[in-house]
Image (cartoon, grey):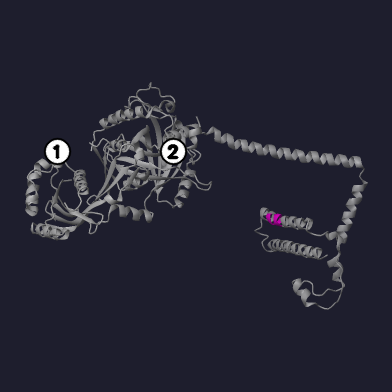
């Protein structure tokens, strides 16, 4: 391994990358669902539309845990707590893959003419001791679930069809129960902020999946009020 | 007096503008008819008509405007008539009226409709007055009935078409909005997915209600949960 | 992957940091070392805010030898455990986002940088340790790339190091290596040693 002639510190590289806006830290997202009986049809359609049709889509079987870091203010009321959510995802079918640590910001739905949900997103690959790290950092686990499904790619866009399973009490992979009779379909793209042309790309692709699945902007914070 | 004059001037300006617009659109229509009659389609012809009708509307609106003085009460009176060509007049009318002479004045300043139009109008009025009032009323009622009938038919067909479209969509339903909401709420907020503390009874029910114990309890649960997780995984770097 | 050993080289009286580096450079080149660029290892520390409970520190280290990784060493609240996380470069961005909970202490940013030499299977890095504008000492890193097991190659490394560093190299390995004498070591172990040394540098005023 040859060394650098003049190594720049990593912090400096990061700040210059941030300034020139090349870090893909924004996620453009559309979500929807399709019932199990029509999932096959959607799968075939996506195979036709996306890249790598011959080798077939990738399947994934992941376990995702969501941690939150809360700092209680001296006043102590829960509303004043700033909460910070971090997600850890590991591949159950490939234990040798690195784990993924993800920070997701608040989703912004924007105006009616903004085609996708926009949220800041930082994806970091890390070693498996991240759970220990996070709990020592002060995070507590909020919830977890298992996802099983298919991953398709088209250009920079990523389409996933996932079935969400609740973890059983025994925490073994056998005691899984599906949450609903549908697959969650997500269409997303990671890009540096400000590239709104990609949102139109996503919208065009989403149109091609109608009427099988209606991908739209859904504000999950509003869903909190539904029972 | 001054104010009225000003108002009149302004009104005349507006009227002139509208009339010019109308003239341009009529001219375009005539041009299209003469030159593009082969490629002209009925809808585009109707469009041009719509433009003209709109402009007439605006013209009438300007005339009905409150600011316009009652044009009914004003008359246009020619002061000087001369057969000599007048340069200014020629320019103002784009070469159409060369001289303000005796023969064009009756045409330009007339207020009655064309003679044949006037005749036809008189004919109609005569026929209308000849009809006795009851028959007239009956005819009016019949016309109203027919028009309403046609209107009904149109609204019914429109409703049928709309229903057809929705029925087709409902038959092929491939997604359930409720499921979408559940899934997204679960993935985004952890609805129905909260890890239950091991001390509480094991129920996959409304986890949110049961997962709110005192912080002390939660931290002990976390340590046990985390220990279990790190034991499960062989990679301990 | 290889065995990394750090050695503090005391700066003799009357000499400056760059002079010592020059002397060491001559010695290394006479042993067959070829200059191949420069290196840098830096460390930034973040401490948790009071509202998070017991104070914890996260040390974020970068090594120019592994430019795509960030090493995050977290000292547990109880003080007797350190969790070492290796992550992508974007982890720095995450730490910046966590600024409400973990704040960086700019004055304690410490780094070791200097020339890098290759001598056969050995990699020698002569680092001048600076904390801000102050020079704190000389830290020499030697990596034997051919083997990852200290038990198998400690003697060879010691002999090589004594060749240009002289008597300051002890015959017994540093405590960190001793604790893992039979284990396979990797980049994270080098980083752990750097953290130990950096912490020691931070505690001393003046030059070690």
Q: Could you say whether the residue bearing mark 2 is in a helix, strand or loop?
A: helix
Q: Is residue B57 left or right of residue A1?
A: right
Q: Which residue appears farthest toward the top when viewing the image?
A: B201
The disc label shown at residue C69, or none: none
Q: Residue furthest bottom?
A: B84
Q: Is residue A41 within the magenta segment? A: no
- Against C19, residue A196 (above or below) is above
Q: Residues within 10 Å of mark 1 (few under 14, many from 20)?
A: few
Q: Which segment is the magenta one?
A: B47-51
Q: Marks 2 and 1: same chain? A: no
Q: Residue A58, can we see it? A: no
Q: Is residue B80 above or below residue B225?
A: below
Give the x, y percent position of residue C159.
Answer: 6, 49
Residues marked 2 and 1 touching at CB (< 8 Å): no
Residue placed farthest to the front in the image? C205
Location of residue B84 in the rendering, given as x and y in whole percent from the top left corner: 83, 78
Q: CA distance from mark 2 to mark 1?
A: 46 Å
Quadrant assignment for the C terminus of chain B: top left
**Residue linked to disc 1:** C179
Q: What is the x, y in percent for residue A47?
A: 40, 41
Which residue is located at x 82 percent, y 75 percent? B99
Left or right of B73 on screen, residue A85: left
Is B32 displayed left or right of B111 in the figure?
Answer: left
Chain for disc number 2: A
Q: Which residue is mark 2?
A: A80
**Residue B49: within the magenta?**
yes
Q: Chain of mark 1?
A: C
């Amino acid at each position: 391994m040859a060394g650098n002639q003049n190594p720049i510190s990593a912090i400096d590289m990061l700040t210059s990358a941030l300034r020139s806006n090349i870090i893909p830290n924004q996620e453009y997202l559309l979500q929807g669902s399709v019932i199990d009986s029509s999932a096959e049809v959607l799968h075939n359609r996506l195979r036709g539309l996306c890249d790598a049709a011959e080798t077939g889509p990738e399947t994934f079987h992941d376990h995702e845990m969501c941690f939150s870091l809360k700092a209680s203010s001296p006043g102590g009321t829960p509303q004043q707590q700033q909460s910070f959510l971090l997600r850890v995802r590991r591949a159950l079918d490939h234990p040798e893959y690195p784990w993924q640590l993800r920070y997701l910001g608040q989703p912004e739905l924007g105006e009616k003419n903004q085609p996708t949900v926009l949220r800041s997103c930082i994806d970091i690959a890390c070693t498996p001791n991240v759970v220990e790290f996070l709990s020592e950092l002060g995070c507590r686990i909020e919830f977890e679930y298992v996802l099983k499904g298919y991953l398709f790619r088209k250009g920079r866009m990523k389409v996933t069809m996932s079935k969400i399973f609740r973890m059983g009490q025994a925490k073994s992979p056998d005691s899984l129960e599906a949450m609903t009779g549908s697959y969650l379909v997500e269409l997303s793209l990671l890009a540096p902020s400000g590239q709104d042309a990609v949102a139109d790309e996503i919208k065009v692709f989403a149109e091609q999946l109608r009427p099988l699945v209606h991908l739209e902007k859904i504000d999950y914070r509003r869903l909190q009020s539904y029972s | 007096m001054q104010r009225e004059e000003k108002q009149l001037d302004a009104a005349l300006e507006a009227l002139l503008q509208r009339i010019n617009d109308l003239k341009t659109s009529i001219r375009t229509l005539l041009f299209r008819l003469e030159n593009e009659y082969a490629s002209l389609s009925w809808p585009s012809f109707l469009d041009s008509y719509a433009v003209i009708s709109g402009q007439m509307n605006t013209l009438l609106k300007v005339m009905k405007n409150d600011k316009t003085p009652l044009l009914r009460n004003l008359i246009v009176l020619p002061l000087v008539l001369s057969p000599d060509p007048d340069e200014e007049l020629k320019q103002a009318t784009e070469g159409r009226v060369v001289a303000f002479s005796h023969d064009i004045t009756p045409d330009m300043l007339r207020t009655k409709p064309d003679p044949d139009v006037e005749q036809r109008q008189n004919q109609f009025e005569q026929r209308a007055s000849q009809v006795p009032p009851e028959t007239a009323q009956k005819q009016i009622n019949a016309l109203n009935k027919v028009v309403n009938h046609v209107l009904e038919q149109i609204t019914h067909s429109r409703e049928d078409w709309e229903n057809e479209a929705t029925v087709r969509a409902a038959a092929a339903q491939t997604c359930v909005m409720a499921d979408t909401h559940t899934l997204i709420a679960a993935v985004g907020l952890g609805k129905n997915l909260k890890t239950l503390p091991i001390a509480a009874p094991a129920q996959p029910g409304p986890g949110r209600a049961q997962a709110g114990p005192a912080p002390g309890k939660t931290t002990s649960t976390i340590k046990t949960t985390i220990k279990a997780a790190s034991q499960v995984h062989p990679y301990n770097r | 992957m290889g065995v990394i050993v750090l050695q503090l080289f005391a700066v003799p009286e009357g000499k400056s940091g760059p002079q010592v580096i020059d002397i060491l450079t001559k010695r290394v080149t006479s042993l067959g070392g070829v200059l191949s660029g420069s290196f840098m290892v830096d460390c930034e520390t973040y401490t948790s805010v009071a509202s998070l409970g017991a104070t914890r520190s996260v040390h974020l280290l970068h090594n120019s030898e592994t430019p795509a990784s960030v090493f995050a060493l977290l000292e547990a609240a109880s003080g007797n455990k350190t969790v070492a996380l290796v992550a992508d470069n974007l982890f720095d961005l995450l730490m910046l986002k966590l600024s409400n909970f973990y704040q960086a202490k700019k004055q304690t940013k410490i780094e070791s940088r200097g020339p890098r030499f290759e001598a056969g299977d050995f990699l020698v890095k002569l680092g001048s340790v600076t904390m801000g504008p102050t020079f704190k000492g000389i830290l020499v890193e030697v990596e034997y790339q051919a083997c990852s097991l200290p038990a198998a190659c400690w003697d060879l490394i010691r002999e090589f190091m004594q060749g240009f560093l002289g008597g300051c190299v002890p015959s017994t390995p540093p405590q960190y290596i001793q604790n893992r004498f039979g284990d396979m070591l990797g980049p994270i172990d080098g980083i752990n040693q750097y953290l130990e040394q950096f912490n020691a540098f931070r505690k001393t005023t003046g030059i070690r």
